[in-house]
Amino acid sequence: MRIGRTLPPAAAPIYLKDIFCAIKSLLHSRRELERFKSEIKNCFHVPDCFLFSSGKAALALALLALKQLTPGKDEVIVPAYVCYSVPSAVVRAGLKVVPCDLKPNSLEMNQDILPSLLSQATLCVIVPHLFGLPAAVSEIRKLCREKRILVLEDAAQTIGIKYNGKMLGTQGDIGFFSLGRGKSFSTVEGGILITNETPIARLFQQKLSEIDSYTFVEKVVLLIKAILIWIFSRPSLYWLPKALPFLKLGDTIYDPDFPLKKMSSIQAGLARNWMEKVQGFNAKRVQNALLYKERIQARASVSFFPTDNEMPVCLRLPLFAGKLEEKAKIVYESQKKGLGVMFTYPDSIDGIPQLGNILAPGAYPEAKRLSQHILTLPVHPFMTKQDIDKVVNLFEVCGTKNVPWKTD
């Protein structure tokens, strides 16, 4: 067990003043929620927004609404390599997962394959900005619009981020965001839906009215979790929760049995000044990503995913490790030294055991290959220049063939 400075793979700091705002929100619940809703509407220029207990709850409720809007359609197309919360939300809504393989050397769906998957049974297509790398939502939306199929823009990892002059989350028919631990900013847990489509918005409001609110005890638990994140997400103390296996930090879990609730005032209170926090956090993330890119990209065995000239805001900076042995070395040494370099979703979604009787295994070769080779680097606001140096040195050492390495 490692004791000492340990970097989380991703982090969004919660501050003491955020805790005080959350406590005060208990006295003005409705006002806090309305204030947060107003800020979201102003930021994304939408007529309304809808606040939920988590990002996957927001997605599941959106899918349930669309299912009601277009009965008879029950297929949801998703990338074959994606956060496991996405297929879990599809199953939670009682719908069928239809994976689309990825473009070669990319985190995006293959648009040459996608048209063959669109059918009369297709309810919608979910397009994520994975890790913060912007996806071609507008292009996919044009393709889907011809067939009257809606596009859900998964901006769970990109709230408050503008790219090429547009806010991510506003390019699809529906956008949704997550406010979980380690996202752009955190309210412990939380989710947001936005849309400019009035009939869909009415259904969202209806679905929101049908679900429960947090109980007082659940709000207190949220507050305690916020305090624990404030204390233990710091690298000086993160080693302690990481050493507790029952917390399952870093594990990728597929769980379609999650609660659907309205957002609480505690979360709205934690979100006070969220725009200022996002701006500061993201500036630091971009700064750290640029440092990595300058110092690591010359290595022949690792490569960064292609982007245009504008450095995207990533919660974790993904790169492709060409040599699996080298990837294993880097992850092992990172764990020993507490450097936060991690593999990510362990398999393409056809490899999720619970979906084994639904999806054809091995049918998505590019997604499978990517899942084996991808690494992510920490870029969060807790990172220091010394941390960056240590991560870069990790790649230099583990990539040197004459350096012995063993796992025992």
Image (cartoon, rainbow, N blue to C red):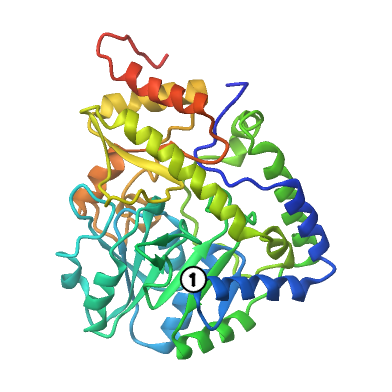
Residue for point 18% across, 50% down: 104
Residue appearing at x 69%, y 65% in the figure: 268
352 vs 174, nearest the viewer? 174
Q: Position of residue 236 (x, y in %)?
A: 65, 28
What amino acid is labelled 1 in the image?
Answer: Ala
Q: Is residue 207 above or below residue 381?
A: below
Foreground pick, 37 / 182: 37
Residue 101: image quadrant is: bottom left
Q: Is residue 297 left or right of residue 199?
A: left
- Rendered residue at 38%/78% (across/down): 173
Residue 224 location (% of width, % of height): 76, 50
Residue 267 image point, x, y percent = 68, 62
Q: Front-most of 207 and 330?
A: 330
Look at the picture and state if 345 lies above or below 159: above
Q: Position of residue 152 (x, y in %)?
A: 39, 72
Q: For numbered disc 1, what is the local secondary structure?
A: helix
- Left or right, residue 15 beside residue 396: right
Residue 189: quadrant of the picture: bottom right
